[in-house]
Image (tube, rainbow, N blue to C red):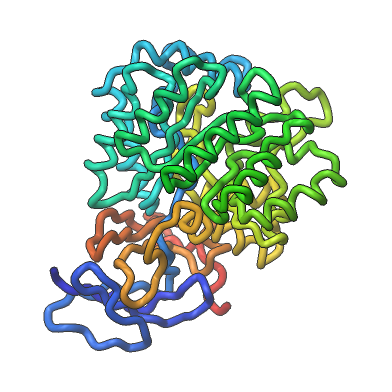
């Protein structure tokens, strides 16, 4: 495989004027003024940010791009979305699921999003979505890592065949154990579902990622049970609580006990800013709660917190384009994470934190790692978020898999034509 040299880029950690040499799909060298191997193409980075690929820790690829099928969510609530998905499920075909998922993966690659953890609904005797997404996972493997979570959308105990179907999905190669305790009929059933699923994951040596407490109900406390069983079963670092929106509404004293428990259990947290801000608070008049979990407080406790996209054009959310910088920007605003360090933490929440949650090996820009990265038209992580920066080049295993040209102006003004420079931070 041929070599490739990226000349004059900066990194998220602040290093500037760096070159990156790629050979045989790996990063061979990083440094200033690297020699160009014979015949190797050189790409001028113009001092722009070379970031690791974006990672999405929470998505639903079986539902994506189904907006309007069979109708649109009128109330905008999570529960109508679930009901709507239930209406659509009998009409799904494997061909349509595969086609929509592949289209989304194209969008993802164009946006430098090269690893996605997707939940897949197992509450279907045919396991149609499971089969479709396992097929897609194999198809996209050369350019995108797709990790699948067996997700009992209709409730593990609420749906009579959910547990059996979830086990069948794991048998077929689905990677992670999912759950939805707040959707079970009672709090007790929710807690019992967490126990069953954590024990199943421990038996099979799998990771856990549950939709957990996706509600405005401050008494929805399944994350406590999830952290308890994580500790009891020794699953430290391998368990993720997704959404955790009830924490937004919880009593502060209770949270002061809860977050240290999560930290001790090394339970990861995933917020889904675009979805949480639109689905939650729908039963409120004014003031309306934001619904996103307590991201800065969780981060301050040392918990790995990621941001997920969750939905794109589906029964729950009508917008989105696989842009994890849009996700980071919304997370930054909703959590009021406006300091420089916090803005950079939001960039980490769509890159390194999510990679840790997925358990990706050899992630990040380092010698010996796979040559996977994104050249962004920005000069710092916070500028990338501000601009939702253009992905000038997306590289996977040393090969350029997507390119987007920089914006140009064609103004009829002397001296003003040419590239549009959105950046302000040249000297920092
Ligand atoms: Fe979700």
Residue under the point 63% across and 41% down: 226
Q: Nearer the viewer, residue 78 or 286?
A: 78
**What quarter of the picture does the C terminus occupy?**
bottom right
The answer to which image quadrant residue 372 occupies is: bottom left
Q: Position of residue 204 (x, y in %)?
A: 41, 43
Q: Is residue 329 visible?
A: yes
Residue 337 placement, left or right of 195: right
Q: Position of residue 350 (x, y in %)?
A: 51, 54
Residue 290 placement, left or right of 395: right
Above or below residue 334? Residue 381 is below
Q: Is residue 388 visible?
A: no
Residue under the point 39% across and 71% down: 365
Residue under the point 66% across and 33% down: 213
Residue under the point 63% across and 16% down: 75
Q: Position of residue 287 (x, y in %)?
A: 83, 31
Above or below residue 108? Residue 367 is below
Q: Nearer the viewer, residue 174 or 395?
A: 174
Q: Position of residue 195 (x, y in %)?
A: 59, 35
């Amino acid at each position: 495989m041929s070599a490739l040299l990226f000349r004059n880029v900066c990194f998220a950690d602040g290093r500037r004027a760096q070159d990156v040499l790629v050979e045989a799909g790996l990063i061979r060298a990083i440094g200033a003024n690297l020699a160009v191997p014979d015949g190797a193409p050189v790409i001028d980075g113009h001092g722009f940010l070379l970031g690791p690929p974006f990672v999405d820790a929470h998505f639903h690829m079986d539902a994506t791009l189904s907006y309007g099928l069979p109708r649109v969510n009128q109330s905008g609530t999570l529960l109508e979305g679930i009901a709507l998905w239930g209406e659509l499920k009998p009409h799904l075909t494997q061909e349509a699921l595969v086609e929509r998922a592949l289209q989304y993966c194209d969008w993802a690659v164009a946006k430098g999003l090269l690893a996605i953890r997707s939940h897949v609904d197992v509450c279907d005797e045919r396991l149609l979505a499971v089969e479709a997404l396992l097929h897609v996972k194999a198809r996209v493997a050369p350019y995108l890592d797709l990790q699948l979570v067996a997700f009992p959308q209709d409730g593990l105990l609420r749906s009579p065949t959910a547990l059996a179907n979830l086990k069948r999905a794991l048998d077929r190669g689905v990677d992670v154990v999912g759950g939805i305790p707040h959707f079970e009929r009672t709090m007790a059933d929710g807690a019992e579902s967490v126990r069953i699923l954590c024990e199943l994951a421990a038996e099979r040596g799998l990771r856990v990622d549950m939709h957990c407490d996706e509600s405005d109900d401050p008494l929805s406390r399944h994350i406590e049970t999830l952290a308890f069983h994580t500790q009891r079963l020794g699953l430290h670092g391998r368990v993720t609580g997704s959404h955790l929106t009830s924490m937004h509404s919880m009593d502060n004293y209770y949270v002061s006990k809860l977050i240290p428990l999560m930290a001790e259990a090394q339970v990861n947290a995933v917020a889904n800013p675009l979805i949480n801000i639109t689905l939650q608070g729908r039963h409120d008049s004014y003031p309306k709660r934001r619904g996103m979990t307590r991201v800065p407080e969780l981060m301050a406790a040392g918990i790995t917190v990621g941001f997920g996209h969750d939905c794109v054009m589906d029964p729950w959310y009508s917008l989105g384009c696989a842009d994890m910088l849009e996700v980071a920007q919304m997370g930054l605003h909703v959590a009021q994470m406006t300091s420089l360090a916090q803005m950079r933490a939001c960039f980490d929440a769509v890159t390194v934190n999510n990679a840790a949650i997925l358990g990706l090996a050899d992630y990040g820009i380092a010698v010996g790692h796979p040559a996977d990265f994104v050249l962004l038209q920005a000069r710092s992580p916070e500028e990338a978020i501000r601009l939702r920066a253009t992905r000038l080049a997306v590289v996977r295993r040393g090969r350029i898999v997507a390119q987007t040209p920089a914006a140009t102006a064609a103004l009829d003004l002397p001296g003003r034509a040419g590239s549009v420079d959105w950046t302000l931070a040249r000297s920092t």
